[in-house]
Amino acid sequence: MTVVVEQIVTPRVREFLAGTKQLYIDGEFVDAVSGRTFVTLDPATGEHLADVAHGESADIDRAVRAARRAFEPWAAVKPNERERLIWRVGDLLTERAAEFGQLESLDNGKSAAVASSVDTAWAADVFRYYAGWATKIEGSTVNVSMPFAPVGEFHAYTLREPVGVCGLIVPWNFPLLMAARKLAPALAAGNTVILKPAEQTPLTAIMLAEVFEEAGFPPGVVNIVPGFGEAGAALAAHDDVDKIAFTGSAEVGRKIVDAAKGNLKRVSLELGGKSPSIVFADADFDAAVQGSLNAWLFNHGQCCVGGTRLYVEDSIFERFTEAIADAASYVRLGPGLDPTAEIGPLVSQEQLDRVTGYLDDGLCNGARALTGGKRWGERGYFVEPTVLVDVKPEFSVVREETFGPVVAAMSFNADEGIVTAANDSIYGLAAGIWTRDISKAHRTARRLKAGSVWINQYNGFDTAMPFGGYKQSGWGRELGASGIDAFTQTKAVNVAL
Ligand code: NAP
Ligand code: MG
Protein backbone atom coordinates (compact mmCIF):
# COMPACT_ATOMS: atom_id res chain seq x y z
CA MET A 1 0.00 0.00 0.00
CA THR A 2 1.23 3.51 -0.76
CA VAL A 3 1.49 6.07 2.05
CA VAL A 4 -1.50 8.04 0.71
CA VAL A 5 -3.68 4.94 0.62
CA GLU A 6 -2.64 4.03 4.13
CA GLN A 7 -3.79 7.43 5.35
CA ILE A 8 -7.21 7.17 3.73
CA VAL A 9 -8.39 3.63 4.40
CA THR A 10 -10.22 2.71 7.59
CA PRO A 11 -8.28 0.70 10.19
CA ARG A 12 -10.45 -2.33 9.50
CA VAL A 13 -9.54 -2.34 5.79
CA ARG A 14 -5.86 -1.79 6.63
CA GLU A 15 -5.97 -4.71 9.03
CA PHE A 16 -7.78 -6.85 6.47
CA LEU A 17 -5.08 -6.21 3.86
CA ALA A 18 -2.22 -7.03 6.22
CA GLY A 19 -2.35 -10.82 6.45
CA THR A 20 -2.59 -13.47 3.74
CA LYS A 21 -6.23 -13.82 2.82
CA GLN A 22 -7.38 -17.41 3.13
CA LEU A 23 -9.99 -19.59 1.45
CA TYR A 24 -13.30 -20.02 3.28
CA ILE A 25 -14.32 -23.68 3.32
CA ASP A 26 -16.70 -25.51 5.65
CA GLY A 27 -16.98 -22.50 7.95
CA GLU A 28 -13.23 -22.05 8.38
CA PHE A 29 -10.57 -19.80 6.93
CA VAL A 30 -7.90 -22.12 5.56
CA ASP A 31 -4.76 -22.08 3.43
CA ALA A 32 -4.76 -23.65 -0.01
CA VAL A 33 -3.90 -27.36 0.01
CA SER A 34 -0.75 -26.51 -2.00
CA GLY A 35 0.16 -23.70 0.41
CA ARG A 36 0.49 -21.40 -2.61
CA THR A 37 -0.61 -17.77 -2.66
CA PHE A 38 -1.04 -15.15 -5.37
CA VAL A 39 -0.90 -11.37 -5.36
CA THR A 40 -3.75 -8.96 -6.07
CA LEU A 41 -2.71 -5.48 -7.25
CA ASP A 42 -3.95 -1.93 -6.85
CA PRO A 43 -4.75 -0.93 -10.46
CA ALA A 44 -4.27 2.77 -9.71
CA THR A 45 -0.57 2.12 -9.10
CA GLY A 46 0.13 -1.43 -10.26
CA GLU A 47 1.51 -2.10 -6.77
CA HIS A 48 1.01 -5.05 -4.42
CA LEU A 49 -2.23 -4.89 -2.48
CA ALA A 50 -2.62 -8.25 -0.74
CA ASP A 51 -1.58 -11.89 -0.78
CA VAL A 52 -4.35 -14.39 -1.35
CA ALA A 53 -4.46 -18.17 -0.92
CA HIS A 54 -4.39 -19.74 -4.37
CA GLY A 55 -7.33 -22.13 -4.64
CA GLU A 56 -6.92 -24.97 -7.12
CA SER A 57 -8.75 -28.14 -7.97
CA ALA A 58 -7.89 -29.86 -4.65
CA ASP A 59 -9.43 -26.90 -2.79
CA ILE A 60 -12.48 -26.89 -5.05
CA ASP A 61 -12.89 -30.57 -4.25
CA ARG A 62 -12.78 -29.87 -0.50
CA ALA A 63 -15.29 -27.08 -0.89
CA VAL A 64 -17.64 -29.23 -2.97
CA ARG A 65 -17.52 -31.97 -0.35
CA ALA A 66 -18.35 -29.44 2.38
CA ALA A 67 -21.20 -28.01 0.32
CA ARG A 68 -22.55 -31.52 -0.35
CA ARG A 69 -22.54 -32.39 3.36
CA ALA A 70 -24.28 -29.12 4.17
CA PHE A 71 -26.89 -29.39 1.42
CA GLU A 72 -29.66 -31.56 2.87
CA PRO A 73 -29.59 -29.89 6.31
CA TRP A 74 -29.61 -26.41 4.71
CA ALA A 75 -32.44 -27.30 2.34
CA ALA A 76 -34.37 -28.48 5.42
CA VAL A 77 -33.84 -25.23 7.37
CA LYS A 78 -37.18 -23.47 7.77
CA PRO A 79 -37.69 -20.81 5.10
CA ASN A 80 -38.19 -18.04 7.66
CA GLU A 81 -34.85 -18.96 9.26
CA ARG A 82 -33.11 -18.81 5.87
CA GLU A 83 -34.85 -15.47 5.37
CA ARG A 84 -33.52 -14.16 8.69
CA LEU A 85 -29.94 -15.22 7.93
CA ILE A 86 -29.91 -13.79 4.40
CA TRP A 87 -31.52 -10.55 5.58
CA ARG A 88 -28.76 -10.26 8.18
CA VAL A 89 -26.16 -10.39 5.38
CA GLY A 90 -27.87 -7.41 3.77
CA ASP A 91 -27.85 -5.50 7.06
CA LEU A 92 -24.19 -6.26 7.76
CA LEU A 93 -23.24 -5.13 4.26
CA THR A 94 -25.10 -1.88 4.85
CA GLU A 95 -23.32 -1.37 8.17
CA ARG A 96 -19.95 -2.06 6.56
CA ALA A 97 -20.62 -0.31 3.23
CA ALA A 98 -17.73 2.15 3.63
CA GLU A 99 -15.26 -0.67 4.26
CA PHE A 100 -16.53 -2.79 1.40
CA GLY A 101 -16.45 0.27 -0.86
CA GLN A 102 -12.84 1.05 0.00
CA LEU A 103 -11.73 -2.52 -0.43
CA GLU A 104 -13.51 -2.88 -3.78
CA SER A 105 -12.03 0.43 -4.90
CA LEU A 106 -8.50 -0.64 -3.99
CA ASP A 107 -8.79 -4.02 -5.65
CA ASN A 108 -10.75 -3.06 -8.76
CA GLY A 109 -9.92 0.63 -9.28
CA LYS A 110 -13.49 1.95 -9.21
CA SER A 111 -14.53 4.95 -7.16
CA ALA A 112 -14.82 4.11 -3.46
CA ALA A 113 -17.91 6.31 -3.23
CA VAL A 114 -19.61 4.43 -6.08
CA ALA A 115 -18.42 1.08 -4.73
CA SER A 116 -20.10 1.77 -1.42
CA SER A 117 -23.21 3.66 -2.58
CA VAL A 118 -23.91 1.57 -5.69
CA ASP A 119 -22.09 -1.78 -5.62
CA THR A 120 -22.36 -2.51 -1.90
CA ALA A 121 -25.74 -0.83 -1.41
CA TRP A 122 -27.22 -2.79 -4.29
CA ALA A 123 -25.62 -6.02 -3.09
CA ALA A 124 -27.31 -5.42 0.29
CA ASP A 125 -30.61 -4.78 -1.50
CA VAL A 126 -30.22 -8.03 -3.44
CA PHE A 127 -29.72 -9.99 -0.21
CA ARG A 128 -32.79 -8.41 1.35
CA TYR A 129 -34.91 -8.93 -1.77
CA TYR A 130 -34.07 -12.65 -1.92
CA ALA A 131 -34.37 -13.02 1.86
CA GLY A 132 -38.02 -12.18 1.24
CA TRP A 133 -38.28 -14.84 -1.47
CA ALA A 134 -37.20 -17.65 0.88
CA THR A 135 -40.73 -17.79 2.34
CA LYS A 136 -42.48 -17.33 -1.00
CA ILE A 137 -41.22 -20.21 -3.12
CA GLU A 138 -44.32 -22.19 -4.00
CA GLY A 139 -45.49 -25.07 -6.10
CA SER A 140 -49.04 -25.34 -7.35
CA THR A 141 -51.91 -27.79 -7.33
CA VAL A 142 -52.78 -29.01 -10.80
CA ASN A 143 -56.31 -29.80 -11.88
CA VAL A 144 -55.47 -33.02 -13.75
CA SER A 145 -57.82 -34.89 -16.11
CA MET A 146 -55.77 -38.10 -16.34
CA PRO A 147 -57.21 -39.18 -19.73
CA PHE A 148 -55.56 -42.61 -19.56
CA ALA A 149 -56.92 -43.40 -16.11
CA PRO A 150 -60.60 -42.56 -16.42
CA VAL A 151 -61.44 -44.07 -13.05
CA GLY A 152 -60.39 -42.69 -9.72
CA GLU A 153 -59.53 -39.46 -8.02
CA PHE A 154 -56.15 -37.78 -8.06
CA HIS A 155 -54.33 -35.14 -6.13
CA ALA A 156 -51.56 -33.58 -8.25
CA TYR A 157 -49.21 -30.84 -7.19
CA THR A 158 -45.73 -29.44 -7.85
CA LEU A 159 -42.88 -28.77 -5.47
CA ARG A 160 -40.13 -26.24 -6.12
CA GLU A 161 -36.90 -27.67 -4.81
CA PRO A 162 -33.31 -26.46 -4.72
CA VAL A 163 -30.94 -27.68 -7.43
CA GLY A 164 -28.25 -28.77 -4.95
CA VAL A 165 -24.58 -27.79 -4.86
CA CYS A 166 -24.02 -24.72 -7.04
CA GLY A 167 -20.76 -23.29 -8.36
CA LEU A 168 -20.87 -19.51 -8.76
CA ILE A 169 -18.17 -17.99 -10.98
CA VAL A 170 -17.95 -14.20 -11.25
CA PRO A 171 -15.84 -11.57 -13.06
CA TRP A 172 -13.89 -8.56 -11.81
CA ASN A 173 -16.03 -5.62 -12.96
CA PHE A 174 -18.59 -5.70 -10.12
CA PRO A 175 -17.02 -8.31 -7.86
CA LEU A 176 -19.23 -8.03 -4.79
CA LEU A 177 -22.43 -7.26 -6.66
CA MET A 178 -22.08 -10.10 -9.17
CA ALA A 179 -21.44 -12.47 -6.26
CA ALA A 180 -24.52 -11.18 -4.40
CA ARG A 181 -26.74 -11.63 -7.45
CA LYS A 182 -25.96 -15.35 -7.46
CA LEU A 183 -25.47 -16.05 -3.75
CA ALA A 184 -28.71 -14.52 -2.54
CA PRO A 185 -31.20 -16.43 -4.75
CA ALA A 186 -29.18 -19.65 -4.54
CA LEU A 187 -29.25 -19.56 -0.73
CA ALA A 188 -32.86 -18.41 -0.48
CA ALA A 189 -33.89 -21.42 -2.56
CA GLY A 190 -31.98 -23.79 -0.25
CA ASN A 191 -28.86 -24.53 -2.31
CA THR A 192 -25.31 -24.63 -0.96
CA VAL A 193 -22.61 -22.81 -2.89
CA ILE A 194 -18.97 -22.50 -3.84
CA LEU A 195 -18.08 -18.98 -5.01
CA LYS A 196 -15.04 -18.47 -7.27
CA PRO A 197 -14.22 -14.76 -7.54
CA ALA A 198 -12.04 -13.36 -10.34
CA GLU A 199 -8.29 -13.52 -9.82
CA GLN A 200 -7.96 -9.72 -10.24
CA THR A 201 -10.51 -8.92 -7.51
CA PRO A 202 -10.81 -11.60 -4.84
CA LEU A 203 -10.90 -9.35 -1.77
CA THR A 204 -14.52 -8.33 -1.23
CA ALA A 205 -15.59 -11.97 -1.69
CA ILE A 206 -13.25 -12.92 1.15
CA MET A 207 -14.54 -10.09 3.33
CA LEU A 208 -18.03 -11.30 2.53
CA ALA A 209 -17.06 -14.65 4.09
CA GLU A 210 -16.64 -12.72 7.38
CA VAL A 211 -20.18 -11.44 6.94
CA PHE A 212 -21.63 -14.93 6.39
CA GLU A 213 -19.70 -16.07 9.45
CA GLU A 214 -21.04 -13.21 11.55
CA ALA A 215 -24.59 -13.68 10.25
CA GLY A 216 -24.47 -17.25 11.57
CA PHE A 217 -24.67 -19.45 8.46
CA PRO A 218 -24.01 -23.15 9.17
CA PRO A 219 -20.59 -24.42 8.00
CA GLY A 220 -20.36 -25.56 4.39
CA VAL A 221 -23.41 -23.64 3.15
CA VAL A 222 -21.22 -20.89 1.68
CA ASN A 223 -17.67 -21.66 0.55
CA ILE A 224 -15.42 -19.11 -1.10
CA VAL A 225 -12.41 -20.22 -3.12
CA PRO A 226 -10.35 -17.50 -4.81
CA GLY A 227 -8.04 -18.68 -7.55
CA PHE A 228 -7.42 -18.54 -11.27
CA GLY A 229 -9.34 -19.89 -14.25
CA GLU A 230 -8.16 -23.38 -13.32
CA ALA A 231 -10.22 -23.28 -10.12
CA GLY A 232 -13.29 -22.21 -12.12
CA ALA A 233 -12.64 -24.98 -14.62
CA ALA A 234 -12.40 -27.56 -11.80
CA LEU A 235 -15.74 -26.36 -10.45
CA ALA A 236 -17.38 -26.49 -13.89
CA ALA A 237 -16.11 -30.04 -14.48
CA HIS A 238 -16.81 -31.39 -10.99
CA ASP A 239 -19.11 -34.41 -11.00
CA ASP A 240 -20.70 -33.53 -7.67
CA VAL A 241 -21.68 -29.99 -8.64
CA ASP A 242 -25.30 -29.71 -9.78
CA LYS A 243 -25.23 -26.28 -11.34
CA ILE A 244 -22.87 -23.54 -12.53
CA ALA A 245 -24.02 -19.94 -12.57
CA PHE A 246 -21.46 -17.95 -14.50
CA THR A 247 -20.91 -14.30 -15.34
CA GLY A 248 -18.01 -13.48 -17.63
CA SER A 249 -16.85 -13.64 -21.22
CA ALA A 250 -18.51 -15.65 -23.98
CA GLU A 251 -15.19 -17.40 -24.54
CA VAL A 252 -15.09 -18.81 -21.00
CA GLY A 253 -18.87 -19.40 -21.13
CA ARG A 254 -18.28 -21.86 -23.98
CA LYS A 255 -15.60 -23.63 -21.93
CA ILE A 256 -18.04 -23.98 -19.07
CA VAL A 257 -20.67 -25.51 -21.31
CA ASP A 258 -18.08 -28.05 -22.51
CA ALA A 259 -16.90 -28.83 -18.98
CA ALA A 260 -20.48 -29.23 -17.72
CA LYS A 261 -21.23 -32.00 -20.23
CA GLY A 262 -19.75 -34.75 -18.03
CA ASN A 263 -22.56 -34.88 -15.46
CA LEU A 264 -24.92 -32.67 -17.49
CA LYS A 265 -25.04 -30.12 -14.71
CA ARG A 266 -27.31 -27.11 -15.20
CA VAL A 267 -25.62 -23.99 -16.56
CA SER A 268 -26.75 -20.38 -16.58
CA LEU A 269 -24.62 -17.77 -18.33
CA GLU A 270 -24.46 -13.98 -18.15
CA LEU A 271 -22.01 -13.08 -20.90
CA GLY A 272 -20.80 -10.09 -22.84
CA GLY A 273 -22.51 -7.39 -24.86
CA LYS A 274 -22.00 -4.72 -27.48
CA SER A 275 -25.05 -2.68 -26.81
CA PRO A 276 -26.54 0.05 -28.97
CA SER A 277 -27.60 3.40 -27.58
CA ILE A 278 -29.94 5.02 -30.10
CA VAL A 279 -30.57 8.77 -30.12
CA PHE A 280 -33.40 10.08 -32.26
CA ALA A 281 -33.41 13.73 -33.35
CA ASP A 282 -36.53 14.43 -31.29
CA ALA A 283 -34.88 13.34 -28.02
CA ASP A 284 -34.39 15.69 -25.07
CA PHE A 285 -30.90 16.69 -26.21
CA ASP A 286 -29.22 17.36 -22.85
CA ALA A 287 -30.75 14.35 -21.15
CA ALA A 288 -29.66 12.14 -24.05
CA VAL A 289 -26.11 13.51 -23.88
CA GLN A 290 -25.83 12.81 -20.15
CA GLY A 291 -27.64 9.50 -20.35
CA SER A 292 -25.75 8.09 -23.29
CA LEU A 293 -22.48 9.25 -21.72
CA ASN A 294 -23.36 7.25 -18.61
CA ALA A 295 -24.20 4.33 -20.92
CA TRP A 296 -20.59 3.82 -22.04
CA LEU A 297 -18.60 5.55 -19.31
CA PHE A 298 -20.08 4.17 -16.09
CA ASN A 299 -17.53 1.97 -14.28
CA HIS A 300 -14.94 3.31 -16.79
CA GLY A 301 -16.70 1.35 -19.51
CA GLN A 302 -16.17 -1.97 -17.74
CA CYS A 303 -19.84 -2.91 -17.94
CA CYS A 304 -21.24 -5.87 -19.83
CA VAL A 305 -24.25 -3.68 -20.72
CA GLY A 306 -22.11 -0.70 -21.83
CA GLY A 307 -23.78 1.30 -24.62
CA THR A 308 -20.60 1.35 -26.68
CA ARG A 309 -22.28 1.65 -30.08
CA LEU A 310 -23.84 5.10 -30.16
CA TYR A 311 -26.25 5.64 -33.07
CA VAL A 312 -27.34 9.24 -33.53
CA GLU A 313 -29.88 10.47 -36.11
CA ASP A 314 -27.99 12.25 -38.89
CA SER A 315 -29.64 15.68 -38.49
CA ILE A 316 -28.16 16.08 -34.98
CA PHE A 317 -25.11 13.82 -35.30
CA GLU A 318 -22.40 16.48 -35.36
CA ARG A 319 -23.84 18.65 -32.60
CA PHE A 320 -24.57 15.61 -30.43
CA THR A 321 -21.16 13.94 -30.76
CA GLU A 322 -19.42 17.25 -30.09
CA ALA A 323 -21.50 17.72 -26.94
CA ILE A 324 -20.78 14.23 -25.70
CA ALA A 325 -17.07 14.59 -26.45
CA ASP A 326 -17.07 17.89 -24.62
CA ALA A 327 -18.75 16.35 -21.56
CA ALA A 328 -16.33 13.39 -21.67
CA SER A 329 -13.31 15.70 -21.84
CA TYR A 330 -14.23 17.20 -18.44
CA VAL A 331 -14.48 13.87 -16.67
CA ARG A 332 -11.80 13.70 -13.98
CA LEU A 333 -9.62 10.63 -13.82
CA GLY A 334 -7.87 9.41 -10.69
CA PRO A 335 -7.54 6.59 -8.19
CA GLY A 336 -10.81 5.28 -6.79
CA LEU A 337 -9.99 6.56 -3.31
CA ASP A 338 -9.63 10.15 -4.61
CA PRO A 339 -13.08 11.66 -3.90
CA THR A 340 -12.72 14.14 -6.77
CA ALA A 341 -12.05 11.42 -9.34
CA GLU A 342 -15.04 10.50 -11.47
CA ILE A 343 -13.50 7.53 -13.21
CA GLY A 344 -10.63 5.30 -12.21
CA PRO A 345 -8.15 2.96 -13.82
CA LEU A 346 -8.99 -0.18 -15.75
CA VAL A 347 -8.57 -3.31 -13.69
CA SER A 348 -5.26 -4.63 -15.07
CA GLN A 349 -2.36 -4.21 -17.48
CA GLU A 350 -4.06 -6.81 -19.68
CA GLN A 351 -7.22 -4.69 -19.92
CA LEU A 352 -5.15 -1.56 -20.57
CA ASP A 353 -3.40 -3.31 -23.47
CA ARG A 354 -6.68 -4.67 -24.77
CA VAL A 355 -8.50 -1.33 -24.75
CA THR A 356 -5.61 0.69 -26.22
CA GLY A 357 -5.32 -2.07 -28.85
CA TYR A 358 -8.93 -1.43 -29.95
CA LEU A 359 -8.24 2.30 -30.03
CA ASP A 360 -5.08 1.93 -32.09
CA ASP A 361 -6.82 -0.43 -34.50
CA GLY A 362 -9.72 2.01 -35.00
CA LEU A 363 -7.48 5.07 -35.33
CA CYS A 364 -5.13 3.31 -37.80
CA ASN A 365 -8.10 2.40 -39.96
CA GLY A 366 -9.33 5.99 -40.24
CA ALA A 367 -11.44 6.57 -37.13
CA ARG A 368 -11.13 9.98 -35.50
CA ALA A 369 -11.10 10.65 -31.74
CA LEU A 370 -13.21 13.71 -30.89
CA THR A 371 -11.73 13.43 -27.41
CA GLY A 372 -9.30 11.00 -25.77
CA GLY A 373 -7.75 8.22 -27.82
CA LYS A 374 -4.95 6.92 -25.62
CA ARG A 375 -3.64 5.91 -22.23
CA TRP A 376 -3.79 8.56 -19.49
CA GLY A 377 -0.69 9.12 -17.32
CA GLU A 378 2.18 6.72 -16.89
CA ARG A 379 1.25 5.02 -13.65
CA GLY A 380 -1.73 2.71 -13.18
CA TYR A 381 -4.01 1.48 -15.95
CA PHE A 382 -5.93 4.60 -16.95
CA VAL A 383 -7.44 5.28 -20.40
CA GLU A 384 -8.80 8.65 -21.54
CA PRO A 385 -12.58 8.72 -22.11
CA THR A 386 -12.73 8.42 -25.89
CA VAL A 387 -15.37 9.31 -28.48
CA LEU A 388 -14.61 7.81 -31.89
CA VAL A 389 -16.29 8.95 -35.12
CA ASP A 390 -15.69 7.94 -38.76
CA VAL A 391 -15.89 4.31 -37.69
CA LYS A 392 -17.10 1.54 -40.02
CA PRO A 393 -19.39 -1.32 -38.92
CA GLU A 394 -16.60 -3.85 -39.53
CA PHE A 395 -14.09 -2.19 -37.16
CA SER A 396 -13.19 -4.31 -34.14
CA VAL A 397 -14.12 -1.39 -31.88
CA VAL A 398 -17.67 -1.60 -33.28
CA ARG A 399 -18.00 -5.39 -33.25
CA GLU A 400 -16.17 -6.57 -30.14
CA GLU A 401 -16.64 -5.89 -26.50
CA THR A 402 -14.13 -3.14 -25.64
CA PHE A 403 -14.66 -3.06 -21.87
CA GLY A 404 -13.07 0.37 -21.57
CA PRO A 405 -14.13 4.05 -21.65
CA VAL A 406 -14.61 4.10 -25.41
CA VAL A 407 -17.65 4.74 -27.58
CA ALA A 408 -18.00 4.35 -31.35
CA ALA A 409 -20.47 6.93 -32.68
CA MET A 410 -22.32 6.40 -35.97
CA SER A 411 -25.12 8.30 -37.68
CA PHE A 412 -28.35 6.89 -39.08
CA ASN A 413 -31.11 8.06 -41.34
CA ALA A 414 -34.59 7.82 -39.83
CA ASP A 415 -36.19 6.82 -43.16
CA GLU A 416 -33.80 3.91 -43.53
CA GLY A 417 -34.39 2.85 -39.92
CA ILE A 418 -31.97 1.90 -37.22
CA VAL A 419 -33.11 -1.51 -35.98
CA THR A 420 -31.11 -3.60 -38.49
CA ALA A 421 -27.85 -1.83 -37.61
CA ALA A 422 -28.60 -1.95 -33.89
CA ASN A 423 -29.26 -5.70 -34.07
CA ASP A 424 -26.13 -6.36 -36.14
CA SER A 425 -24.16 -8.01 -33.33
CA ILE A 426 -23.55 -11.51 -32.05
CA TYR A 427 -24.60 -10.14 -28.66
CA GLY A 428 -27.99 -9.00 -27.38
CA LEU A 429 -27.63 -7.87 -23.80
CA ALA A 430 -29.05 -4.34 -23.59
CA ALA A 431 -30.07 -1.29 -25.61
CA GLY A 432 -30.93 2.35 -24.99
CA ILE A 433 -33.46 4.51 -26.89
CA TRP A 434 -33.75 8.29 -26.64
CA THR A 435 -36.84 9.95 -28.10
CA ARG A 436 -39.85 12.03 -27.06
CA ASP A 437 -42.11 10.00 -29.37
CA ILE A 438 -43.61 7.36 -27.12
CA SER A 439 -44.91 5.16 -29.95
CA LYS A 440 -41.56 5.18 -31.71
CA ALA A 441 -39.87 4.28 -28.42
CA HIS A 442 -42.07 1.24 -27.77
CA ARG A 443 -42.06 0.15 -31.42
CA THR A 444 -38.27 0.24 -31.48
CA ALA A 445 -38.04 -1.55 -28.12
CA ARG A 446 -40.11 -4.44 -29.51
CA ARG A 447 -37.82 -4.88 -32.50
CA LEU A 448 -34.50 -4.79 -30.66
CA LYS A 449 -32.90 -8.16 -29.89
CA ALA A 450 -31.79 -7.38 -26.37
CA GLY A 451 -32.52 -8.71 -22.89
CA SER A 452 -32.92 -5.21 -21.41
CA VAL A 453 -34.18 -2.10 -23.17
CA TRP A 454 -33.93 1.28 -21.48
CA ILE A 455 -35.95 4.21 -22.76
CA ASN A 456 -34.78 7.75 -22.00
CA GLN A 457 -32.35 6.36 -19.43
CA TYR A 458 -29.56 3.80 -19.35
CA ASN A 459 -28.44 1.25 -16.75
CA GLY A 460 -31.99 1.27 -15.37
CA PHE A 461 -31.52 -1.80 -13.21
CA ASP A 462 -33.75 -3.01 -10.43
CA THR A 463 -33.46 -6.13 -8.29
CA ALA A 464 -37.04 -7.07 -9.18
CA MET A 465 -36.44 -6.85 -12.98
CA PRO A 466 -35.11 -9.92 -14.80
CA PHE A 467 -31.71 -9.45 -16.41
CA GLY A 468 -29.92 -11.50 -19.06
CA GLY A 469 -29.06 -11.77 -22.69
CA TYR A 470 -30.42 -12.63 -26.12
CA LYS A 471 -28.15 -14.40 -28.61
CA GLN A 472 -24.56 -14.94 -27.41
CA SER A 473 -25.08 -12.75 -24.36
CA GLY A 474 -26.17 -15.73 -22.31
CA TRP A 475 -28.53 -18.40 -21.14
CA GLY A 476 -31.21 -17.72 -18.57
CA ARG A 477 -32.08 -14.69 -16.45
CA GLU A 478 -30.92 -13.38 -13.11
CA LEU A 479 -32.70 -11.09 -10.64
CA GLY A 480 -36.40 -10.87 -9.93
CA ALA A 481 -38.43 -14.07 -9.81
CA SER A 482 -36.18 -15.44 -12.58
CA GLY A 483 -33.34 -15.55 -10.07
CA ILE A 484 -35.30 -18.08 -8.03
CA ASP A 485 -36.24 -20.07 -11.15
CA ALA A 486 -32.53 -20.34 -11.96
CA PHE A 487 -31.82 -22.03 -8.63
CA THR A 488 -34.85 -24.31 -8.28
CA GLN A 489 -36.25 -27.33 -10.07
CA THR A 490 -39.83 -28.52 -10.24
CA LYS A 491 -41.06 -31.87 -9.02
CA ALA A 492 -44.49 -33.08 -10.17
CA VAL A 493 -46.28 -35.29 -7.63
CA ASN A 494 -49.42 -37.17 -8.56
CA VAL A 495 -51.34 -39.17 -5.96
CA ALA A 496 -54.11 -41.68 -6.59
CA LEU A 497 -56.51 -40.99 -3.77
P1 NAP B 1 -13.70 -14.12 -17.87
O1 NAP B 1 -12.31 -14.14 -18.31
O2 NAP B 1 -14.70 -14.89 -18.62
O3 NAP B 1 -13.67 -14.57 -16.33
C1 NAP B 1 -14.83 -14.69 -15.55
C2 NAP B 1 -14.59 -15.69 -14.45
O4 NAP B 1 -14.37 -16.99 -15.01
C3 NAP B 1 -13.37 -15.41 -13.60
O5 NAP B 1 -13.64 -15.76 -12.27
C4 NAP B 1 -12.35 -16.33 -14.22
O6 NAP B 1 -11.28 -16.63 -13.40
C5 NAP B 1 -13.18 -17.54 -14.49
N1 NAP B 1 -12.59 -18.46 -15.47
C6 NAP B 1 -11.57 -18.26 -16.34
N2 NAP B 1 -11.35 -19.36 -17.08
C7 NAP B 1 -12.23 -20.29 -16.68
C8 NAP B 1 -12.53 -21.63 -17.08
N3 NAP B 1 -11.87 -22.23 -18.06
N4 NAP B 1 -13.53 -22.28 -16.46
C9 NAP B 1 -14.25 -21.68 -15.48
N5 NAP B 1 -14.02 -20.42 -15.06
C10 NAP B 1 -13.04 -19.72 -15.65
O7 NAP B 1 -14.29 -12.67 -17.83
P2 NAP B 1 -13.57 -11.38 -17.26
O8 NAP B 1 -12.54 -10.95 -18.23
O9 NAP B 1 -13.14 -11.62 -15.88
O10 NAP B 1 -14.81 -10.36 -17.24
C11 NAP B 1 -15.24 -9.64 -18.32
C12 NAP B 1 -16.36 -10.34 -19.08
O11 NAP B 1 -17.47 -10.59 -18.24
C13 NAP B 1 -16.90 -9.51 -20.19
O12 NAP B 1 -17.05 -10.29 -21.35
C14 NAP B 1 -18.23 -9.03 -19.69
O13 NAP B 1 -19.16 -8.65 -20.64
C15 NAP B 1 -18.68 -10.16 -18.89
N6 NAP B 1 -19.66 -9.72 -17.91
C16 NAP B 1 -20.97 -10.06 -18.10
C17 NAP B 1 -21.94 -9.65 -17.21
C18 NAP B 1 -23.37 -10.03 -17.39
O14 NAP B 1 -24.11 -9.98 -16.41
N7 NAP B 1 -23.83 -10.42 -18.55
C19 NAP B 1 -21.57 -8.91 -16.10
C20 NAP B 1 -20.23 -8.58 -15.92
C21 NAP B 1 -19.29 -9.00 -16.84
P3 NAP B 1 -9.94 -15.73 -13.53
O15 NAP B 1 -10.32 -14.39 -13.09
O16 NAP B 1 -8.99 -16.35 -12.62
O17 NAP B 1 -9.53 -15.81 -14.97
MG1 MG C 1 -6.75 -6.14 -7.80
Image: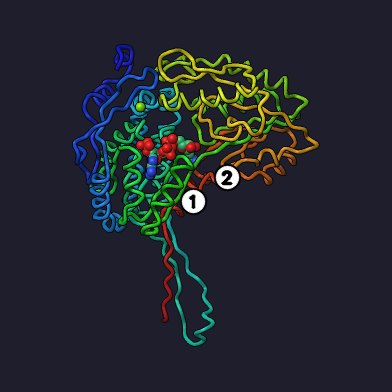
Ligand 1 positioned in quadrant: top left
Q: Quadrant of the C terminus?
A: bottom left
**Colour setup of the view:** rainbow
Can residue 493 be seen here? The reply is yes
From the image, tell me which residue sits under label 2: 451
Residue 147 position, x and y percent, is 54, 82
User: Which amino acid type is marked by label 2?
Assistant: Gly
35 displayed left or right of 261: left
Instruction: Report which quarter residue 413 is drawn in.
Output: top right
- Above or below, 377 against 420 in this view is above
Count neighbours of disc 2 (C-alpha within 10 A) and say few if under 14, some if 14 to 19, many if 20 or more.
many
What is the number of callouts on the image? 2
What's the mark number on residue 47? none
- Mark 2 vs mark 1, foreground winner is 2
- Give the mark, 2 or 1, whose residue is nearer the N terminus: 2
Along the line of sight, the residue nearer the viewer: 94 or 347: 347
- Residue located 46% across and 24% down the image: 353
Along the line of sight, the residue nearer the viewer: 376 or 137: 376
- Residue located 57% across and 28% down the image: 296
From the image, tell me which residue sits under label 1: 481
